[in-house]
Image (spheres, grey):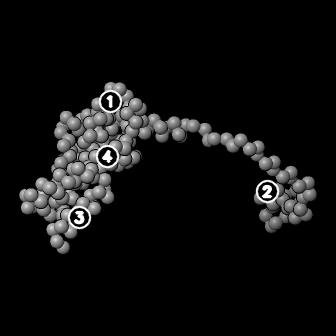
Amino acid sequence: MTARARVLSAVGAALTVGVAPARLLSAVSAATKAGAFAGGVLLGVAACSGSRTEGLDPGKVPESLRADYALFTQRCSKCHSLARPLTAGITDDDQWSLYVNRMRRQPGSGISYDDQERILRFLRWHAAELRRQEAEKRAAPAPSSSAPASPSPAPSSATPPSAASAPSSATDVAPGGKGSS
């Protein structure tokens, strides 16, 4: 495969995962000028340089945590979509600590120890919100249907002949199969 074909292949792959075109062109230009281009290197650089905009409505985040949320969106969207952590379903604070610590150690994440604490402060609030919402779902009564329930059929007044002559319980049967009366 030629160098040009490798570049085009890497560019296509990077655009597929949502890398900003300006950042991608900058990475291609720098790699080509340096003469050290390798498809894997470019893709690695491109994967952690994208900008993503999905996430929570900042208005729903408490005022005291909006700066932490902004840092979360800036740092975490460098390497993956914000949906990845926000929809991970993690509600345990210790699990978030492990998760963010692992992300901090990723090359190019840009997450410092101070950033980690601020990101965790936001994620702990998010986890508490998820726990609260789950508790509300469990506590909420099941929705009743507005349609009236269909009447159950009236019990039949005719008793089958086998039921009329049968004993009503096992205690009514004496040993040997005869009634106890």
Q: Earlier in the sequence, mark 3 or mark 4?
A: 3
The residue at which mark 4 appears reads as 52
Which of label 4 and label 2 is nearer to you?
A: 4
Most extreme residue toward the left is 34
Q: Earlier in the sequence, mark 4 or mark 2?
A: 4
**Marks 3,4: beta carbons within 8 A:** no
The residue at which mark 1 appears reads as 65
Image quadrant in which you'd find residue 3: bottom left
Q: Earlier in the sequence, mark 4 or mark 1?
A: 4
Secondary structure beneath dot 4 equals loop
The residue under the point 26% across, 58% down is 14
Secondary structure beneath dot 3 equals helix
User: Does residue 82 sit above or below 32 in this rendering?
Assistant: above
Q: Earlier in the sequence, mark 3 or mark 2?
A: 3
Secondary structure beneath dot 1 equals helix
Label 2 to label 1, Cα distance in Å?
68 Å
Image quadrant in which you'd find residue 70: top left
The residue at which mark 3 appears reads as 8
Q: Position of residue 133 (x, y in %)?
A: 47, 37
The residue under the point 26% across, 34% down is 118
The residue at which mark 2 appears reads as 169
Say which amino acid is labelled 1. Leu
Q: Position of residue 103 (x, y in %)?
A: 23, 47
Q: Relative to residue 2, is residue 164 drawn left or right?
A: right
Say which amino acid is labelled 3. Leu
Which of label 3 and label 2 is nearer to you?
A: 3
**Marks 4,2: beta carbons within 8 A:** no
Label 4 to label 1, Cα distance in Å?
20 Å
